[in-house]
Image: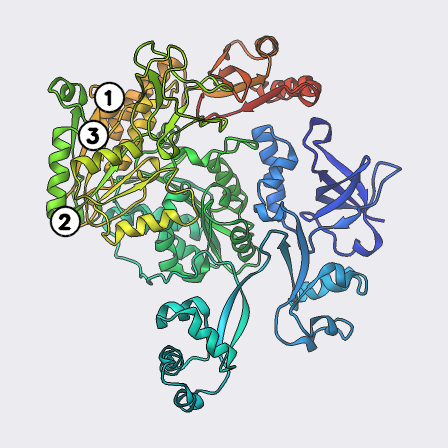
Amino acid sequence: MKYASVIVDVSSMQTDRAFDYKVPEDLQEFLSPGMRVIVPFGPRKVQGFVTEVKNHSEFDKVKPIIELLDLTPCLTPELLKVGQWLTSKTLCFKISAFQVMLPAAMKAKYEKAVRLTSDDTTVLPGELQPYFHKTNQVNVKDLEEQIPLAEIQKLIKKGQLEFVYQVKQKTNKKTIKHIALNLSQTDIDQVIQTLPPHAKKQAEVLTFFKNRSITDIPLQQLLTEANISDASVKSLLSKKILKEEIKETYRDPYQDRSFKKTTPLLLNEEQQKAIDPILTSVVNKQHEVFLMYGVTGSGKTEVYLQSIEAVLQNGKEAIVLVPEISLTPQMVNRFKGRFGSKVAVLHSGLSKGEKYDEWRKIQRKEVQLVVGARSAIFAPFENLGMIIIDEEHESSYKQEENPRYHARDVAIYRAQLHNCPVVLGSATPTLESFARAHKGVYKLLTLRERVNNRSMPSVEIIDMREELRNGNRTMFSTSLLEKLTNRLEKGEQTVLFLNKRGYSSFVMCRDCGFVIQCPHCDISLTYHRYGQQLKCHYCGHEERMPKVCPECDSEHIRFFGTGTQKVEEELVKVLPQARVVRMDVDTTSRKGSHEKLLSKFEKKEADILLGTQMIAKGLDFPDVTLVGVLTADTMLNLPDFRASEKTFQLLTQVSGRAGRHELPGEVVIQTYTPEHYSIQLAGQYDYDEFFKQEMLHRKHHAYPPYYFISLITISHPEITKVVSVAEKISQNLRRNLGKETKILGPVASPIPRIKDRYRYQCMVKYKRENNLHDTLRKIIEHFQQEMTSNDLTITIDLSPNTMM
């Protein structure tokens, strides 16, 4: 008799362990760890992951597994190990750790099917052949009644059938209409002559087929390329000269794009010095962590590409992480151009179906390289030869909900299991990484020069207080306006960066000072010009912009602060001839809009690219010679110990977008705090000096990298409840943790109320604290009952990225 240990899909402390189930006779042969099953759990049926298959169970009464969800494991043995590690590292439930590794489509409702891998049905056993006569894909349910699962499993192992999920969404398979000739190429001229004289367009359609010597073509393509209307095609269909076919297609997000094949470039001396140790550790199968610290435009990507080439030639696989979606269009071009169809791409701009299809390519070993955002770190590769994290300082590598993992930690853990190198690349590494490189924990590789010795753009820092004193009330300094006009005359391009989103920050009455707040959160509402709406960026509450102040009925109610929409309007006023492309949350929310806007700018159909964080990094346009930063200091005022570091990183990254090719670049930084060291040093591109100064501050205030930090946030609809639980937790921490450990709080969170829930937090700062994990686990166990029944939430982040 065989038994399976199953982690069930019920997120609570009591179920955070494996339960034993009996393996039914027909599944005994091929049930293996990493497969998902449906099991009885109390009165209900739940999904679960098999973590182990064994020959005995310590329990007498064991229920049987009801159904198998996978015919091939969806988690490899290594990913099961990663899941266990994530659980202890981030204090999450095992089930959350396993689920975060799967594409969303596998969590939706779906049907299981098997597909024939070739057109030849004769390779199948006799009793199976009739099922595949009319179609190459059959539902597993239809087969199960007639043929034992074990038989199907054997055919999958032999590669004659493959297992697929059909997501039960509105569109299951993607199909397109094709128009085909219903006659041979030689008969075309004859048919044209029989057409009546007024049917010119129909004749054009047939001539199109003849000139291209094709027999079928997608309908949309035919209409655009032959420049004809639907009517002509319909007439030919009714005369049976043409016929219509429906074809299924693979959901490929890049099918309409052809990528220009590129070849490796000659590396300069610095790049060669950087790549040598990486290649050595690839060849020797050594696990090393390299920090590649190279100024913007120093050719880090070329080093990545050539080291990946070495990995792939070695028969191994590689993962490249890039920050969220903004980086992907140009990055994808470079990787697809170099490695073609060996690349799978995973990022949030893809639909569920596209993500699932890309994930399946990886699982079936059809690709050797994955380029993607944070979650791509869980790609189900079994033979990893290298992991690269580009722009390693990016905050999007940290997941802000359970499991709260950092992709860098997962990368290093997986690379240890595979004995392969990790390369972290950045022009502005995080202080933690740079400090580790100084200590020799990571190996430092430095690129100080731009490729072809191009100079870094010159930076001018403008004090906006002076501009105000001189009577300039616009959001553009005199210097920036002059330079913008100059670029327009020369036909060069500009990138304008605004450190913010929305049309304006808040709405305030000038008579009584009343600010319109969200009724459910303690935060002011943001004004969105589109539809004259006020929105809360935390809970989604919306209301209309009032005509008069709700408090004193004054008409002097105005919005304050600047957003991208407002900047765009001002730009049009001062430079009516400029063509502006705006990129922010509102203009890029639709699928594919990101790429459309960027390619418009690339084709020089616009002079100015205006945007928020998403344009700060990774973009490379030859004609951009000016970068303007409109509000350099908004982040400095946030209650966050990393504010200076994030400001420095952002300014350096944005500045790096200028003068990357033949034309020299200039940068204008507008600020109200020009004396701040992070702004001054970003203007000088002096990361080393910034590192020294910022490390002094961190040491003085006991922050990372000198101390580790954990943040515990408590929330509940009643404030008294929150305060009393927070008090109990901080007392418990003080009792159980060492004397060297600092416990701050409890205090109200920087945003004290979100979605009608009050929030308090405690912070733990420590250098070495062996008791921390145990203590926190016990706290969660202690409050488990209240968390299930009393609407209490306690979240623990063991390395928070933000204190908000």
Image spot of residue 419 (x, y percent): 50, 46
In front of the other: label 3 or label 2? 2
Distance Cα–Cα, label 2 vs label 1? 35 Å
What residue is disc 1 on?
Answer: 677
Q: Estimate how packed mark 1 is, as few (under 14), some (14 to 19) or many (20 or more) residues with alpha carbons within 10 Å.
A: some
Going by the numbered disc 1, the residue's amino acid type is: Tyr
Identify the residue at horizontal 31%, vertical 30% (top origin).
563
Q: Residue at x 34, y 9 (%)?
A: 512
Rendered view: 194 above or below 410: below
| Residue that label 2 marks | 491
Give the mark nearer the N terminus: 3 vs 1.
Answer: 3
Q: Comparing marks 2 and 1, which lies closer to the viewer?
A: 2
Q: Secondary structure beneath disc 3?
A: strand
Q: Earlier in the sequence, mark 3 or mark 2?
A: 2
Q: Of residues 546 and 86, which is closer to you in this image?
A: 546
Q: Is residue 645 left or right of residue 238?
A: left
What residue type is disc 2 on?
Gly
- Residue 669 has which mark? 3
- In the image, residue 404 sits, relative to residue 319, either above or below, namely above
